[in-house]
Image (tube, rainbow, N blue to C red):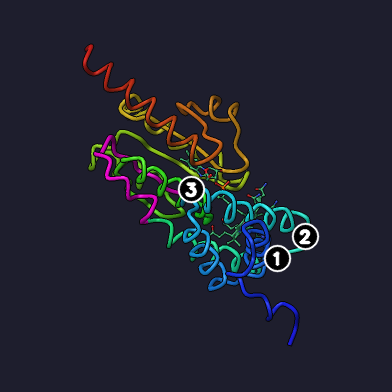
Amino acid sequence: MSEEDDIILSELDDDELVQQMFDDLYDGLKEEIQEGVNILLGRGWQPYEVLTKALVGGMTIVGKDFRDGILFVPEVLLAANAMKGGMAILKPLLAETGAPTIGKMVIGTVKGDIHDIGKNLVGMMMEGAGFEVLDLGINNPVENYLDTAEREGADIVGMSALLTTTMPYMKVVIDTMIERGIRDNYIVLVGGAPLNEEFGKAIGADAYCRDAAVAVETAKEYVARKHNRAKAG
Ligand code: B12
């Protein structure tokens, strides 16, 4: 039996457990990740803390080794699957605030892009903050965003892209809004690892959000402004 098999997660202290979860996420061990999430919650960790410290922290390590050619797509898919297993436990807890709905958001990953972990996380956090979230999934053409936003009377359109080759598609969506004269009907938030503030400005988004917590803060701020404008007008 290898040393690995002997580890009993519940016997580790918090720091050791988080380190072990980094390893387990790296190895794509979904059940172990779920067990780790439950242990941390049982020890009084806030769901958001578990999410950012244990899961996102682990995924950052996976991301570095993927970039450096140490890990490949199949392994990263397993890691992503383990991460989703952990997120599934946290989702209802993050959404459990009982806050009244403060706005509606349509969110999706843009055409050509299948990365959805960050988008899902943003969706979860937005729900937790009291927004109604309509998740379009991955690989979305312009029409998916605009048709849904219009039909549902959304306040916010959120786009996610993780590839340098797909991020320009966000501009296609915004340009189409402008062409149709509906750009000002929506708050457009964009995010994803390769983006930055400058890019957000250049394509005409209202804001670029570095992470899910910033997305929530930014969304709240813009929705409040939108409502104030509506009252004044
Ligand atoms: C997991 C992963 C995958 C998984 C995706 C699984 C899934 N279901 O999502 C798989 C294995 C499928 C995959 C595939 C590919 N991947 Co990949 N992947 C990653 C990896 C390691 C992690 C991404 C992730 O989930 N991060 C964790 C989340 C929590 O972070 P996040 O996505 O950045 O989201 C946060 C913020 O950005 C923000 N945010 C995100 N979206 C939004 C949206 C809104 C509205 C807002 C407000 C905020 C916001 O908030 C989030 C939460 O805090 C990254 C590495 C990296 N550094 O990002 C590479 C990475 C993105 N992939 C990369 C590549 C190249 C690919 C492939 C082309 C590989 C290949 N040769 O096939 C394919 C592309 C397939 C496609 N057409 O999309 C490159 C992109 C390079 C580039 N410059 O474009 C990266 C950077 C790795 C690298 N350095 O080489 N990948």
Picture quadrant of residue 19: bottom right
Residue 94 on the magenta span: yes
Which residue is located at x 50 percent, y 52 percent?
A: 45
On the rendered image, what quadrant is the N terminus found in? bottom right
The CA distance from mark 3 to mark 2 is 30 Å
Quarter the C terminus occupies: top left
Q: Quadrant of residue 79?
A: bottom right
Residues drawn in magenta = 92-110
- How many residues crowd mark 1 within 10 Å: few (<14), some (14–19), many (20+)? few
* Labels 2 and 1 touching (C-beta < 8 A): yes
129 over 120 or under it: above or below: above
- Name which residue lies at 24% across and 39% down: 100
Disc 1 marks a residue whose amino acid type is Phe
Sequence order check, earlier mark of 1 and 3? 3
Task: Tell me the residue that label 3 is attached to.
Answer: 48
Task: Name the disc covering residue 72, or none.
Answer: 1
Q: Nearer the viewer, mark 3 or mark 2?
A: 3
Say whether residue 132 is magenta: no
Earlier residue among tags 3 and 2: 3
Q: Residue 94's spot in the image, x, y percent?
A: 39, 50
Q: Tell me the mark number nearer the camera, choosing from 1 and 3.
A: 3
Name the residue carrying label 2.
69
Q: Disc 1, ligand 1: is the CB inside 8 Å?
A: no
